[in-house]
Image (cartoon, rainbow, N blue to C red):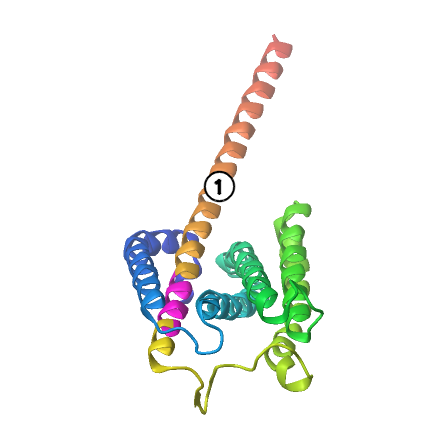
């Protein structure tokens, strides 16, 4: 796997894998939506329960991507793998979208369930903090032009933000919150088997979606960096030719 840390090998590998990833992603999303609309509604929540099929996978991915991002940054910092920081950098916007989707679907569910769009509940607040951490992380890469320095600062920010992940996970157990506890635990599931199947398919579909988008983003980043490096080489050659011509004209 460490061989894939080489951008050239990654480009070769992803070229072969990406078409299959796209097919699997589209297929799982399509099948997932089919199972969602054919799954029974919750007895108490009715049609509102269908928001769960987007909300829960989004919340899971928002947290999982942040952990992945922090680990990728750590790998890049310790072992200096050229692809690790690129993976972290390009995972952040995807994670931010999932965090935002978590907040939006949570608000859509909260309005009819709680009678308000927003409450400063422990779970909601910590997810909002996660979204802000994503935005701050993205801003670092945009503001700091030196990519090596940006990676170092981003590693620190990602590490600090990791503290928030277990707080999000256990907030409903540590505090008296409005947010319902987890429907799926190691001891079993609290929802109907058909609903559970649809939910698990959406979890898989969203995960494949993340991997596909990450591959595309990293490939784009590599291509952009190569194009920039080529432009710099051409510019340097042109400058060298110009300087050489000036020296020759002065000598004559």
Is residue 159 shown in magenta?
no
* Residue nearest the observer in this picture, 90 or 171: 171
Secondary structure, magenta segment, majority class: helix
Q: Count the labels in the image.
A: 1
Q: Going by the picture, which residue comes out furthest to the right? A: 120
Disc 1 crowd, CA 10 A, few/some/many (<14, 14-19, 20+): few
Left or right of 52 in this view: 167: right
Identify the image quadrant of the C terminus: top right
Res. 134 image quadrant: bottom right
What is the secondary structure assignment of the residue under circle 1? helix
Q: Please say if 239 is above or below 149.
A: above
Identify the image quadrant of the N terminus: bottom left
- The spot of residue 48 in percent (x, y) is 48, 67
Left or right of 208 in this view: 118: right
Q: Which residues are magenta?
A: 199-208
Per the image, the residue denoted by label 1 is: 224
Res. 178 image quadrant: bottom right
- The spot of residue 204 in percent (x, y) is 37, 69
* Residue nearest the observer in this picture, 3 or 65: 65
Q: Please say if 212 is above or below 223.
A: below
Q: Going by the picture, which residue comes out furthest to the top? A: 252
- The spot of residue 174 in percent (x, y) is 67, 85
- The spot of residue 203 in percent (x, y) is 41, 70
Is residue 202 shown in magenta?
yes
- Residue at 37%, 51% in the rendered image: 11
């Amino acid at each position: 796997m460490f061989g894939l840390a080489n951008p050239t090998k990654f480009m070769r590998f992803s070229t072969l894998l990406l078409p299959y990833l796209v097919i699997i992603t589209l297929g799982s999303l399509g099948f997932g939506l089919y199972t969602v609309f054919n799954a029974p509604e919750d007895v108490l929540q009715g049609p509102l329960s269908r928001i769960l099929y987007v909300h829960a996978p989004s919340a899971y991915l928002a947290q999982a991507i942040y952990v992945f991002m922090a680990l990728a940054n750590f790998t890049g910092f310790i072992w200096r793998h050229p692809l690790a920081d690129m993976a972290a950098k390009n995972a952040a916007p995807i994670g931010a979208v999932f965090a935002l989707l978590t907040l939006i679907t949570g608000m859509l569910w909260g309005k009819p369930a709680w009678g308000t769009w927003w409450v400063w509940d422990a779970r909601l607040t910590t997810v909002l903090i996660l979204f802000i951490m994503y935005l701050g992380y993205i801003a670092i890469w945009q503001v700091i032009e030196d990519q090596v320095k940006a990676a170092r600062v981003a590693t620190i920010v990602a590490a600090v933000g990791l503290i928030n992940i277990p707080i999000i996970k256990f907030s409903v157990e540590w505090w008296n919150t409005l947010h319902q506890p987890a429907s799926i635990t190691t001891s079993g599931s609290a929802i109907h088997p058909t609903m559970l199947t649809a939910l698990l398919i959406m979890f898989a579909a969203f995960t494949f979606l993340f991997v596909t988008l990450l591959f595309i983003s990293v490939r784009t980043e590599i291509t952009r960096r190569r194009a920039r490096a080529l432009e710099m080489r051409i510019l340097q050659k042109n400058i060298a030719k110009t300087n050489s011509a000036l020296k020759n004209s002065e000598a004559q």
